[in-house]
Image: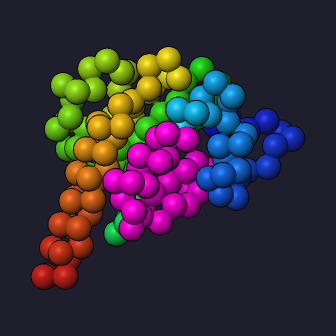
């Protein structure tokens, strides 16, 4: 979410959501709940001034903007894996743009988060072996 010159950056996700555009807030709150259900072990932080979930490195992020919201899948292979399911939304690299009127389904968000968990766990396992 873009901040104006009078608004301080959020210290936590609750503050971030409280400052989000009113129309987007319920969708973002549902997205947060879905991410937390799919990755209960993930740490929820503000990084790059947006909500971020970390587990063995970054998992996913989300952000609110004036005209849309974004969900950042962090991994191009994961985005490619779900490309057919992502067709109803604009995507660019590892970013999915959505709106309050066309939100991401919880089932798809869970699949992306779980795929990211698998990637991060595999990376950590490979690092420990070598």
Q: How many marks?
A: 0
Q: Residue at x 34, y 53 (%)?
A: 38
Q: Residue at x 24, y 73 (%)?
A: 124
Residue 16 in magenta? no
Q: From the viewer's perspective, tell me whether residue 46 is left or right of residue 97.
A: right
Q: Looking at the image, is 33 positioned above or below residue 85?
A: below
* Among the 4 quarters of the image, the one containing residue 111: top left
Q: Looking at the image, is 120 positioned above or below residue 25?
A: below
Q: Quadrant of the C terminus?
A: bottom left
Q: Residue at x 39, y 54 (%)?
A: 37
Residue 52 in magenta? yes
Residue 24 x, y percent position in the rendering: 60, 29
Find the residue positioned furthest to the bottom: 129
Q: Looking at the image, is 6 positioned above or below residue 13?
A: above
Q: Looking at the image, is 107 positioned above or below residue 75?
A: above
Indicate how the structure is coloured in the image.
rainbow
Q: From the viewer's perspective, tell me whether residue 6 is left or right of residue 122.
A: right
Q: From the viewer's perspective, tell me whether residue 129 is left or right of residue 1.
A: left
Residue 40 x, y percent position in the rendering: 39, 63
* Among the 4 quarters of the image, the one containing residue 68: top right
Residue 14 x, y percent position in the rendering: 66, 52
Residue 94 visible in the current orientation: no
- Image: magenta residue range: 29-54
Nearest the camera: 14 or 126?
Answer: 14
Residue 72 x, y percent position in the rendering: 41, 42
């Amino acid at each position: 979410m873009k901040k104006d010159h009078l608004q301080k950056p959020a210290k936590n996700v609750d503050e971030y959501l409280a400052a989000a555009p009113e129309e987007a807030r319920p969708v973002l709150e549902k997205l947060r709940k879905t991410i937390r259900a799919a990755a209960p072990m993930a740490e929820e932080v503000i990084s790059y001034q947006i909500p971020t979930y970390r587990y063995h490195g970054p998992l996913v992020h989300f952000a609110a903007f004036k005209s849309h919201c974004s969900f950042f899948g962090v991994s191009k292979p994961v985005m490619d894996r779900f490309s057919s399911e992502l067709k109803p939304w604009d995507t660019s690299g590892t970013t999915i743009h959505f709106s309050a009127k066309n939100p991401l389904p919880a089932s798809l968000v869970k699949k992306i988060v779980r795929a990211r968990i698998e990637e991060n766990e595999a990376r950590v396992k490979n690092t420990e072996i070598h």
